[in-house]
Image (cartoon, rainbow, N blue to C red):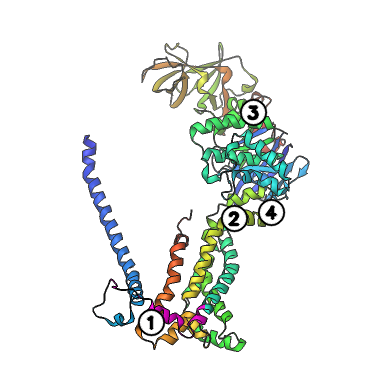
Amino acid sequence: MTADAREAAPGRRRFARQRLISRALTYFVATLLALFILVPIYLITISALTPRELAFEYPRQLVPREISFDTITFFINASGVQPAFWRSVAVGVITLVLALAIGAPAGYALARYAFRGRDGYRILVLSTRAFPIVILAIPLAVTYLRIGLDDTILGVAFMHTALALPFTVLITSSVFASVPRELEEAAQTLGCHPFQAFMKVSLPLALPGLAAAAIFTWVISWNDVFAAVILTLLNPTLPAKVLTALTQSPIYYQFAAGFVMLLPSMIVIFFIRRYLLGLWGRVVK
Amino acid sequence: MADIRLERVTKLFKQVRAVDDVDLTIADGEFMVLLGPSGCGKTTLLRSIAGLEQLDTGRIFIGDRDVTDLPPRSRRIAMVFQSYAVFPHMTVFENIAFGLRMQKVAGPEVRRRVEGAAELLHIGELLQRYPAQTSGGQRQRIAVARAIAMEPQVLLMDEPLSNLDALLRLEMRAELKRLLGEIGSTTIYVTHDQVEALSMGDRIAVMRSGRLVQVGDPLTIYDAPADRFVGAFIGNPPMNFLPARIEDREGGLVAALDGAGRVPLGPRTEALAGRDGQDLLLGIRAENIEIDVEPRPDSPRGRVLVVEPLGSHNLVTLRVGDEQLKATTRPDATLARDQEVGVVIDPARIRWLDAERGLAIDAAEAGPGAGQGAPRPDEHEDAAPQAS
């Protein structure tokens, strides 16, 4: 070891220790956050999957001794649950189609064109989510009643489209931004007009990301309770049904309902998570 | 095949003149290199010719057609992008065939031309692969094959070699030159690498701050730069510039260097007429300087600062007066640090510049190759006096 290196060593050691501490801290906070989300999910899951007499047992078994699908089966076969499920699916699909049809072009424009006020527009899009739905709810319900959209699948889908659009726009914009502009330009020099270049090059390359955006939009719709409860009465979506019908039910049915609601979103989020990171400005590659 | 004519081409980005009033004519089948430091507007000019940028003023002609307002697809050009822009979701075959399919060329003809282009670039065995399964050098070949399969009137290349490693770049440089010579298409090639420009171009157009500074064949650009910028930008090491004054002495004309002796110039040339006593810059290439280990009493003196052995020759940095000078010597020359040596400058190879503006004072010396690209000499006074 040379003299220089020996002098530098304590500094390097201090630097290494600082890095270790900051990394430990990061992991500690991340673990807390993960537990905050995961513990309730876990509890719901085991409660939904244990025989119903064990749901009241105290102290609670953290590892279920026996697994039973009784409560879940009962919940699924309860009256009104399956129609509500299919309504939820339909609302989700309509929302997805509408949000992509409106949001993807906006996302493309945000990704490709430098126009005046682009950054402002980006913030504005997101800020619509900051506006409390509670305040919107009553005028919206009144308007829906007046034009006859209340208690319909389409009415809920419109509302969900409005709620999902900010995310659809931002996700699709990050998806299109990850497709290099030169690819479109190369297609143009090779004989495409701009729309052909988009269809032949950008769209196929963006497709996986767009699929992720679509599914995420669907999840937003699937998870919404508030708008659905206010805008429906006799034709509730699944979350609305769960909220209104099961508040009076025994606790194990509530667990089963919670689990059924959770499962699709969990699966979907798991598969599209890398595209969601793009939303926060990470590079999608 | 076609010639290209740029007339007063100007492109603004906000208030910045990215391309500023450029006139350039490129002959049919010519290999023209656009050379300049990054940000000089060379890529913007190329993209304007491709139709990817809209001009603010000026016209572009390819052959007899005014293409200024045509979209890229109608200009009969093909372009190789710096990033290659190979389509990742298509096989190599489909990449090369892309342009032909857009032109609705019949299937067997597509196959023939794709295979021909792939053959030329030695990527015949890659045709069924996807770009992700190829190396950077191979992708570069795919991009070139895709362009030449189009049999374009004009081939545009935007720093095609800059993403390759040094060895591959050297190999591709020679291969591209051979290939483009074979197909004989009019080519515009953008680079910031002066070695690439000198070694590949039929002619070089040097750009700076959006303007053409000098247009000429590589040797002219190298030997007779239009100004100090070109002399310093082209060649490695850059041209040396020493402040000097012309004096008429008994025994002939001399150039008096600032505090470092006098360079004998021999008989007065036309270029130096009426320049006596003016502040000039003496431009000289490193290889045109000889180092005299036993200095003659009348020759300028220099002190050795650094000797860098480079294998084929040594690069010597000297201090001459207040200036530094780079000279090359034979690899076996032995020079010590701080050694005082004589500096022998070949008067025939001197490039004289105006000290104040850094412009070459004589255009005639620039030779027949210079100025061909600037048909309106009157408007280039401030940029390129060799145009007259």
Residue type at numbered disc 2:
Ser
Q: Is residue B359 something that shows in the picture?
A: no
Mark 2: few/some/many CA within 10 Å (<14, 14-19, 20+): many
Residue type at numbered disc 1:
Gln
Of the pair B290 and A85, the residue shown nearer to us: A85
Q: Does the segment drawn in magenta span residue B364?
A: no
Q: Report how far apart the C-alphas of labels 1 and 4 lie in the structure.
A: 56 Å
What secondary structure is found at the residue carrying circle 4?
A: loop
Residue type at numbered disc 4:
His
Residue A248 place in picture, x, y as percent: 39, 89
Q: Report how far apart the C-alphas of labels 1 and 2 lie in the structure.
A: 45 Å
What secondary structure is found at the residue carrying circle 2?
A: helix
Q: Report how far apart the C-alphas of labels 2 and 4 lie in the structure.
A: 13 Å
**For mark 1, what is the residue?**
A254
Residue B323 place in picture, x, y as percent: 45, 27
User: B162 left or right of A2?
Assistant: right
B200 relative to B80, above or below: above
Q: Quadrant of residue B41?
A: top right
